[in-house]
Image (spheres, grey):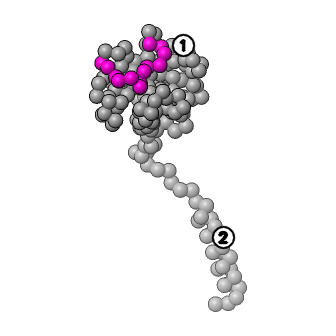
Amino acid sequence: MNRHRLFSLLGALSLTVPLAACQRTPDPPASISAPPGLGDRVRVLSADAFVIDGRHVRLANAYAPQGVPDARCWAEAAAAKQVTDWVRGKVREARVVAIETPDGFDEFHRELAVVRLDGEDLGQALYEAGLASRRTEAAYGRFSWCEPISAKAAGAPAVGSLLDSGKQR
């Protein structure tokens, strides 16, 4: 092989290798959907407080146990962690979040609103799972999570809840 032909062949290879590396990769098939989750749209601050699309929101229909430093006892702090993890799991699995008309503001000037994840009322789901008490006009203040839970207490979750058994149902 003569020298001129060798340099010509090497020159052609040096142009095709970089061009091959720049070729566009094909789009994934349309049958592959985006992974579930709401990405950066929802930030869970606690089980009943969120930042949703930049809005500070608190559940209008449920009151969850508070974590450290706001917990009144260790049991409330432990329950708050478990309930917040439960809510984060719900948010991770959800694809759609909606905020219903605010019902005013809490003591930290967060909007009180009903939050729906994939159409499900999050406050109602927390209450039905025994993970939160009802937030009502009469019981606007904090629920007494450190007292023994009684089915007769206003807004109390069902007996057999996370706080009674130490595990989620």
Q: Residue furthest top?
A: 138
- The secondary element bearing badge 1 is classed as loop
* Residue that mark 2 sits on: 15
| Nearer to us in this view, 73 or 110 | 73
| Nearer to us in this view, 64 or 86 | 64
Q: Position of residue 94 (x, y in %)?
A: 43, 34
Amino acid type indicated by mark 2: Leu
Q: Is residue 94 visible?
A: no
At horizontal 57% and vertical 56% (from top left) the residue drawn is: 24
Q: Position of residue 69 (x, y in %)?
A: 54, 31
At horizontal 58% and vertical 25% (from top left) the residue drawn is: 55
Looking at the figure, which quarter contains the N terminus? bottom right
Residue 109 sits in quarter:
top right
Q: Which residues are magenta?
A: 139-151
Q: Residues within 10 Å of mark 1 (few under 14, many from 20)?
A: few
Q: Position of residue 57 (x, y in %)?
A: 53, 23
At horizontal 47% and vertical 14% (from top left) the residue drawn is: 140
Dot 2 or dot 1, earlier in sequence: 2
